Image (spheres, grey):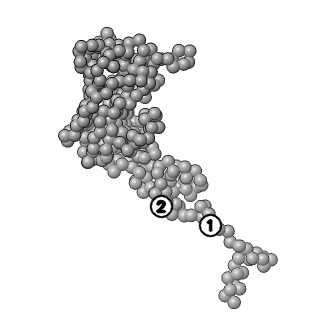
């Protein structure tokens, strides 16, 4: 009798048996979906949020995004934003940190890499100390669409070449790489096409340039290389440093020099310095879009 009664629960008015449909994603409770999303990366979470209302609602759960944010994100918020609403959810905080946030009157930009949640930072040529930068016989600031800062420092000719920088910032714990973004030749557009003026390029094949990096906790590195590949933006690796404590600021000093005064050098564009997690160095697409 129990078997008959149970079967009748899945029968229509005519007595025909109805086979219950299999559970689908729509049937999953929002809390369960949120637990699943917590194991995915930010890009995957955003893609699945488009599936239906349940996934969209689950994608806003604070605990999902708490694990994607840097451990010291509260320190970063105080460093980057002057005034931030207190009622922001963790997803909105993540989204705001992923924007190219501007610091120090536009000379620096800091953001989280959207797919990994790792912190990146860039310093414009105007945020660096460049020998002779105020003398237009040697240097000029030229506008360009090829820089995220919309301007680069262009060297016509100089004997003593030195670019220095210093930064103090609460980097999340991890290993970071520092790069100079440089370009031999002056690029412009003519009739809608990119052209490069190589007229002033000289001196970089005689002696190499030297990169130096040091931190407030005693780390240091030094390397040298010849500048090459005219007409192309190149990222030159200056060194790596390790951050142990993300709740304290790390001071980083770095330089690019060629101070052999036996010859002049020129025809170089200095765009910016880029600092980002060393684990992303293998991702070529990251450098291409930075």
Residue 257 lies, with reference to residue 276, above or below; the image says above
Instruction: Tell me if 29 is positioned left or right of 121 in this view.
Output: right
Mark before the other along the chain sequence, 2 or 1: 1
Residue 1 lies, with reference to residue 223, above or below; the image says below
Task: Report x, y in % for residue 285.
Answer: 47, 37
Q: As rendered, which of 81 and 273 lies closer to the eye? A: 273
- Kindly give the residue lying farthest to the front in the view shown: 206
- Kindly give the residue lying farthest to the bottom in the view shown: 1
Task: Report x, y in % for residue 27.
Answer: 60, 64
Quarter holding the N terminus is bottom right
Residue 54 lies, with reference to residue 214, above or below; the image says below
- Kindly give the residue lying farthest to the right in the view shown: 14
Quarter holding the C terminus is top left
Residue 23: numbered disc:
1
Instruction: Tell me if 70 is positioned left or right of 284 in this view.
Output: left
Q: Which residue is found at the position 27% from the left and 19% from the top?
A: 161
Task: Report x, y in % for residue 246.
Answer: 28, 47
Based on the displayed image, in which of its 4 quarters is residue 103 positioned?
A: top left
Q: Which residue is found at the position 27% from the left and 45% from the top?
A: 243
Residue 288: numbered disc:
none
Residue 217 lies, with reference to residue 49, above or below; the image says above
Measured Cα–Cα span from mark 2 to mark 1: 18 Å
Task: Report x, y in % for residue 203.
Answer: 32, 16
Q: Which residue is found at the position 33% from the left and 19% from the top?
A: 205
Give the structural element (helix, strand or loop) at label 2.
helix
Residue 35: numbered disc:
2
Q: Is residue 101 visible?
A: yes
Q: Is residue 78 visible?
A: no
Graded by Cα atoms within 10 Å as few (under 14), some (14 to 19) or many (20 or more), the crowding at tag 1 reads few
Based on the displayed image, in which of its 4 quarters is residue 142 positioned?
A: top left
Q: Which residue is found at the position 38% from the left and 15% from the top?
A: 201
């Amino acid at each position: 009798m129990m078997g008959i009664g149970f079967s009748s629960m899945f029968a229509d008015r005519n007595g025909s048996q109805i086979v219950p449909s299999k559970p689908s994603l729509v049937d999953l409770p929002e809390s369960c979906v949120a637990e699943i999303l917590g194991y995915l990366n930010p890009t995957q979470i955003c893609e699945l949020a488009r599936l239906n209302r349940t996934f969209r609602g689950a994608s806003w759960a604070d605990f999902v995004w708490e694990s994607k944010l840097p451990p010291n994100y509260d320190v970063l918020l105080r460093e980057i934003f002057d005034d931030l609403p207190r009622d922001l959810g963790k997803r909105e905080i993540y989204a705001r940190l992923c924007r190219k946030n501007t610091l120090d009157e536009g000379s620096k930009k800091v953001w989280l890499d959207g797919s990994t949640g790792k912190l990146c930072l860039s310093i414009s040529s105007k945020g660096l100390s460049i020998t002779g930068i105020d003398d237009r016989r040697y240097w000029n600031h030229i506008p360009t669409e090829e820089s995220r800062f919309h301007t680069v420092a262009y060297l016509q000719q100089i004997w003593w070449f030195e670019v220095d920088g210093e930064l103090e910032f609460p980097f999340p714990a991890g290993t970071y790489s520092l790069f100079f973004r440089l370009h031999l030749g002056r690029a412009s557009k003519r009739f809608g096409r990119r052209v490069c003026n190589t007229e002033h390029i000289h001196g970089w094949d005689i002696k190499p340039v030297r990169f130096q990096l040091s931190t407030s906790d005693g780390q240091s590195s030094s390397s040298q290389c010849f500048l090459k590949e005219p007409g192309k933006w190149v990222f030159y690796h200056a060194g790596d440093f390790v951050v142990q404590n993300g709740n304290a600021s790390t001071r980083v000093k770095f330089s690019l020099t060629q101070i052999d005064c036996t010859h002049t050098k020129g025809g170089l564009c200095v765009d910016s310095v880029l600092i980002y997690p060393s684990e992303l160095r293998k991702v070529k697409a990251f450098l291409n879009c930075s």
